[in-house]
Structures are given as C-alpha cells and as structure tokens.
Image (cartoon, rainbow, N blue to C red):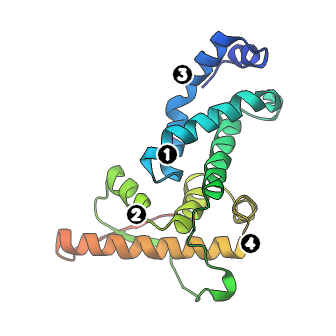
Amino acid sequence: MVDSSVIALVKQRKNAAFKVLYQSCINYVWSIVRRYVSNESEHADVIQEIFARVFLSIHTFDEGKGEFKFWLRRLVINQCLQHHRKEQFEGKIVPLEKAKAIEVSDTFLFNELTKEDIENYLTEMPLGYRQVFMLVVIDEYSHKEVGDLLGISAETSRSQLSRAKSWLRKKTLKKTQTKNNRQWTLISIK
C-alpha cells in the first residue's frame, strides 16, 4: 500500500511525503468510511479527521508489529466510531437484558445479489446492527473486540449480529419474493 520509505519521511515531517501518503491511501480510507458513515455529506469531514489522526499518530506505527494497511484500517474504523460518538448518534443497540432471544441461522435467502444491492442494504440497516455486522463479518473483529470498541458487552455484540442477520434475511427475502416470484437460491454467509 505505502512504501516504508514514505512512512519514514512522514515521521520526519517532510511535506511531500504527506501528500504521497494521502494519495496512496485515500481510496482505501474512503471505502471504509463509506461503510461506517451512512451520511455521505459527512464523509469528507470524517476523512479529514482520519488523516489528521494518521499524521499526528504516525510515530506509533511500528513495522515490526504488522503492516501499515492493518494499522490504518484500525485507525479508520476507530475514527468512524468516534465520529458517531462525538455526534451523539443514537444507535439501535439494545442491551442484552432487554433483547428478545432470536434464533438465526447463517443461511440467508439471496437470489443474484450484486455488490450494489449489498451496499444498499447496509446503508438501510439500523446503525447499531450495521456497525456490529461490519466489524464482525467484514472486518473480522471478535465480539470481545467489538464490545470494547462500541462500549457494549460481547454478548450484546452477538445479539446485535444476530439481529442484523435477521434484518438482512427479511430484506432479501422480500426482494427475492417480488423479483423472482418466490424462487430463491440459498447462500451461506459466515
């Protein structure tokens, strides 16, 4: 993604290196922001906050501990979640004590869903469900890590993921029923 010499120059505060780093990472950062921040008008502000944080904390990146891409991804996700907290968005996270038990299998009913369909479903999904779904399914965080990031328990994270899957199943079932006259294809999502 970014050459280690560029990172070294950024750590030395060389202006040209900031531009190279930004240009090398902007598409990757934007793709993550787009998944976590549903309001498109806020994307530019969030990306600006992210790169400010990258440039201020680049000295904490250690190549010996992992690749820059993974360090950046964690920083981007944390900043997106911080943006939600700062703006005091009301998520749809329900405490486990108040949640109804939902049995959800990992099999969803899909019929030729495109990437665009999936992205549309994610933008329609309630915020709390979407955050947990993306952190666990897409970014492969554990429920404990999700709990730590969102300030919820691992059990609540599991419950929210279950509800997100149930929500997706209902949405895709409605679409496939109307689109293909009740002919479905089974696809498993883990």
Q: CA distance from mark 2 to mark 1?
A: 17 Å
Q: Quadrant of residue 7?
A: top right
Q: CA distance from mark 3 to mark 4?
A: 37 Å
According to the picture, the residue beneath numbered tag 4 turns out to be: 153
Q: CA distance from mark 4 to mark 1?
A: 28 Å
Tell me which numbered mark, 2 or 1, is placed earlier along the sequence. 1
According to the picture, the residue beneath numbered tag 2 turns out to be: 124
Residue 104 in the image, given as x and y percentages of width and height: 51, 80
At horizontal 65% and vertical 46% (from top left) the residue drawn is 79
At horizontal 63% and vertical 32% (from top left) the residue drawn is 51
Residue situated in front as seen by the camera: 168 or 54: 54
What crowding class fits label 2: few (fewer than 14 Cα within 10 Å), some (14-19), or many (20 or more)? few
For residue 13, side relative to residue 137 (left or right): right
What amino acid type should be assigned to the residue bearing mark 1?
A: Glu
Q: Which mark is residue 42?
A: 1
Element type where label 1 sits in the image: helix
What amino acid type should be assigned to the residue bearing mark 3?
A: Gln
Residue 10 in the image, given as x and y percentages of width and height: 72, 18
